[in-house]
Image (spheres, grey):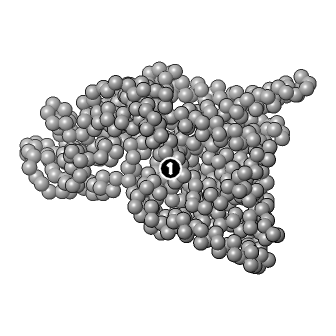
Amino acid sequence: MNDSAAHLWFTEPYSTLLLALFFLLLAVLCPHASERFFRPVERFFSHLAAHKTLAILFLFLLVLFARLALLNQLPIPNPGIHDEFSYLLMGDTFAHGRLANPPHPLWRSFETFHVLSFPTYASKYPPAQGVVLAAGQLLGHPWIGVLVSAAGMAAATVWMLQAWIPARWAFLAGFLAAARLCVASYWINSYWGGAVAAIGGALVLGAFGRIRRKRSFASSFLLGLGVAILANSRPYEGVFFCAPIGIALLWWCFSHSNSDSRRGSAKRVLAPAAGVLLLTFCSMAYYNWRVTGNPAELPMAYSLHRDNRPAAFLWQTPRPPFHYDVPEIDYFYNQSELNRYDRTWPALKSAFQEKLWRCSAAFFWPTCWLLVPGAIFLYRDARLRLVFAALFATVFGYCLVVWPGPHYLAPAVAAGFALLVQSIRHLRTIRVFRRPIGPALSRVVVLALLFDVSQLVAQRISDPQGWGGWGLIDRAELRDTLSATPGKHVVLVRYGADHSVHEEWVYNSADIDASKIIWARDLPGEVNNRLFAYYPDRTIWLVTPENNDVSVLRRPLTRSAPAEKSGDSHGP
């Protein structure tokens, strides 16, 4: 977390306590007055939530308009994390009508993190996020896809929970998800958040909740579609999430007492979902074949087998170091990531501490501890046991991996906010000497979230963890300058000894040779000589990110003037 986020006034314990005490005093001293003030507001949103389709559309549009209205405070994000650039490459590839790109003959100059150079030039990640970014790019900017998917996540949360709990509480869960994840969070202020997988999880649970009431082709199709989205966004966590739901679905289908009901369930429930999944897995096999050359090998699995030396799961031992020609890649895999987890108790403790901290920063806010009295009664919610089972199964799968990203829990986000809302419901039933203590505390929880998000926006903090928003500003500024400079350019990136391996500049678009700006590693000798010969019509720049020093190495070759030698020390 950056320093400014760490000093938000509302994250301080005494501020949270003061707000809670204020509402408690109102509840104790003026119980009727406080109820008369808040009841009309709550009644309005209850009436809105009763119109289920309208409530879904309202929240979808609210996220769109609210986030667009805040562009002056939180501009369209610049990528800055390795994964973001990889996803953007995938989106650009899809937007050009390709599933993968041919390997570049100068791939050593462009080799970078989370991107395959062979057998194709492509992202290693599952394709669902790339489809969203491609759609946004075709509409004008990849972030448009992120924005729409985040709004869809909030709307899908409401739709899903309408099948499990009363409409007004389903709406509140969607609103909490929108406020927490769709304003000042890397889920909307970056290109690698979990909104797409969250939509998939919401479709699965929402469809199953409707199937239990009425067997229909539409619900079965949406169930299969949700599983398909999970398989192409977060396949590992999706397995844990879908396991209890799949068991419950099969039990429900085959527990009917007569054979006609069982045949009807198989025909109207299992067949449509199975058809969607069959088409999905055939498409995935074709995509794998186009990217890795093997229909059964996911690009992610191919990359893990070839490149990654660190342990992926807690029980694994890191693989022996392997030499990489690029110093930054060698350091990342053989030192930075290997030192992260070494299968010792201190490393295990550190991994869980980081997961707890990052998930708290992503999903919770300072007053969530007030929900503990209500959470005690969650065992009573028999109707939601399957929802909670899917949530806890996903958390269990998350605990088994070394990496700490909160978006790994994306399939179960709607289920997580269902747990929070159910805790609020139980909290509201608590009365002390006939005073509405529980309702008062529940309002503190909701208002505290709004205040916390408002403070983040006011301080222009795109994410409390620093994982989204501003990105690599120096790189973006140089990109914008060169975009306005006539001609085509190659930017050689030379890192100093103090450079952070997590601030990587060398990423390119899908069609490298057609790009106005090409980013390449400075690899003196044969590699650079081949690069210079390959691009005789481009200006060659040298940049050192640590001090943002930019100089010209060579002007474009012309018939009347030979190439310039290194020595110009001016910037663009």
Numbered disc 1: secondary structure: helix
Residue ID for mark 1? 357
Q: Which residue is pictured at 74% across the width and 73% down the height?
A: 27
Does the rendering let one see residue 26? yes
- Give coordinates of residue 478: x percent, y percent: 27, 55
Q: Quadrant of the C terminus?
A: bottom left
Image quarter where the N terminus lies is bottom left
Is 469 rendered above or below residue 448? above
Q: Please name whichever residue, 234 or 566, is drawn nearer the observer in this view of the structure.
A: 234
- Say which quarter of the image contains residue 197: top right
> At 76% across and 32% down in the image, what residue appears?
248
Q: In this image, 22 relative to 569: left or right? A: right
| Structural crowding at the residue carrying mark 1, measured as other residues with C-alpha within 10 Å and reported as few (<14), some (14–19) or many (≥20) | some
Residue shown at 19% from the left, 32% from the top:
527
Going by the numbered disc 1, the residue's amino acid type is Trp
Camera-nearest residue between 212 and 398: 398
- Find residue 338 and report its horizontal and vertical position in percent: 36, 33
Q: Is residue 87 left or right of residue 412?
A: left
Instruction: Please say if 323 is above or below 501.
Output: above
In depth, the one of 275 and 492 nearer the eye is: 492
Query: Is residue 514 shown to the viewer in this render?
Result: no
- Count of residue discs: 1
Q: Nearer the viewer, residue 323 or 299?
A: 323
Q: Residue at x 79, y 38 (%)?
A: 211
Q: Position of residue 336 (x, y in %)?
A: 34, 38
Q: Quadrant of residue 3?
A: bottom left
